[in-house]
Image (tube, grey):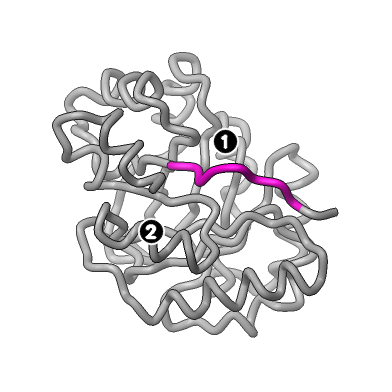
């Protein structure tokens, strides 16, 4: 099935929000025109940082109608997939580097009724996920080293995005290419040109005075 998408989607990353006003922040980006809400889950093991867990997601779910795009940076990931689905995740993305049976876990995510995604770190080759692309709804390309927001975009990742786009076209696949890390108004257009369908934006939305203007600026 060929994919059809008329415009780039913007997924503000909650990790960059003001945690003292979490409800207000979530509702503000929805009103501002965000397409997804991106939720980074970090365990202090797979990545050197901690964020939040399913309880926060379950409390946010009733006050926001955006798709919850949950990015699990945890290991072993198998132990918590169902927890995040029950909490309200619409999409669940897992790292190939954090599982020994990627296909099984992707199938589990789909059986739970969520979109299934695979993510790769900047140093991980597209070749490592090539055999799984027919089983995913989205591929999340990390354009910074996972663990902290505010890092600079790694330009070499553009080639990965282009390769994924080419594979998708050649094989008639329909997965979304999601790019996460260091995205701003200066580099968004080149990332979109390379083939990105969804931009995950942290500081470039939540640290700006006008969320609507920031989101529209990223769309190009």
* The image quarter in which residue 94 lies: bottom right
Dominant secondary structure of the residues highlighted in magenta in the image: loop
Residue at horizontal 35 percent and vertical 57 percent from the top: 188
> What is the residue that sits farthest to the right in this orientation?
1
Residue mark closest to the camera, 2 vs 1: 2
Q: Is residue 5 magenta?
A: yes
Q: Residue at x 52, y 42 (%)?
A: 69
Which label belongs to residue 189? 2
Name the image quarter holding residue 55: top left
Q: Nearer the viewer, residue 14 or 50?
A: 14
What are the residue bounds of the magenta stretch?
A: 3-10
Residue sitting at x 60%, y 62%: 118
Q: Left or right: where does residue 11 sit relative to residue 204?
A: right
Q: Quadrant of the N terminus?
A: bottom right
- Crowding near the residue tagged with mark 2, few <14, some 14–19, many ≥20 C-alpha atoms within 10 Å: some
Say which label, 2 or 1, has the lower sequence index: 1
Residue picked out by circle 1: 89
């Amino acid at each position: 099935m060929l994919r059809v998408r008329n415009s780039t989607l913007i997924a503000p990353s909650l990790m960059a929000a003001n945690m003292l006003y979490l409800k207000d922040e979530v509702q503000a980006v929805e009103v501002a025109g965000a397409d997804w809400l991106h939720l980074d889950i970090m365990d202090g093991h797979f990545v050197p940082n901690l964020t939040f867990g399913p309880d926060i997601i379950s409390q946010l779910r009733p006050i926001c109608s955006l798709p919850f795009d949950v990015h699990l940076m945890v290991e072993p990931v198998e132990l918590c997939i169902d927890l995040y689905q029950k909490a309200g995740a619409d999409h669940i993305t897992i790292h190939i580097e954090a599982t020994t049976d990627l296909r099984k876990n992707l199938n589990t995510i789909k059986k739970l009724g969520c979109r299934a995604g695979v993510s790769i770190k900047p140093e991980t080759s597209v070749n490592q996920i090539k055999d799984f692309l027919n089983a995913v709804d989205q591929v999340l390309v990390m354009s910074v080293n996972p663990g902290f927001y505010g890092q600079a975009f790694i330009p070499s990742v553009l080639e990965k995005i282009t390769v994924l786009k080419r594979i998708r076209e050649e094989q008639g696949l329909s997965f979304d290419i999601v790019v996460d890390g260091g995205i701003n108004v200066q580099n968004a257009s080149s990332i979109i040109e390379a083939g990105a369908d969804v931009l995950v934006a942290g500081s470039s939305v939540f640290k700006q005075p006008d969320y609507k203007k920031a989101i529209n600026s990223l769309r190009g």
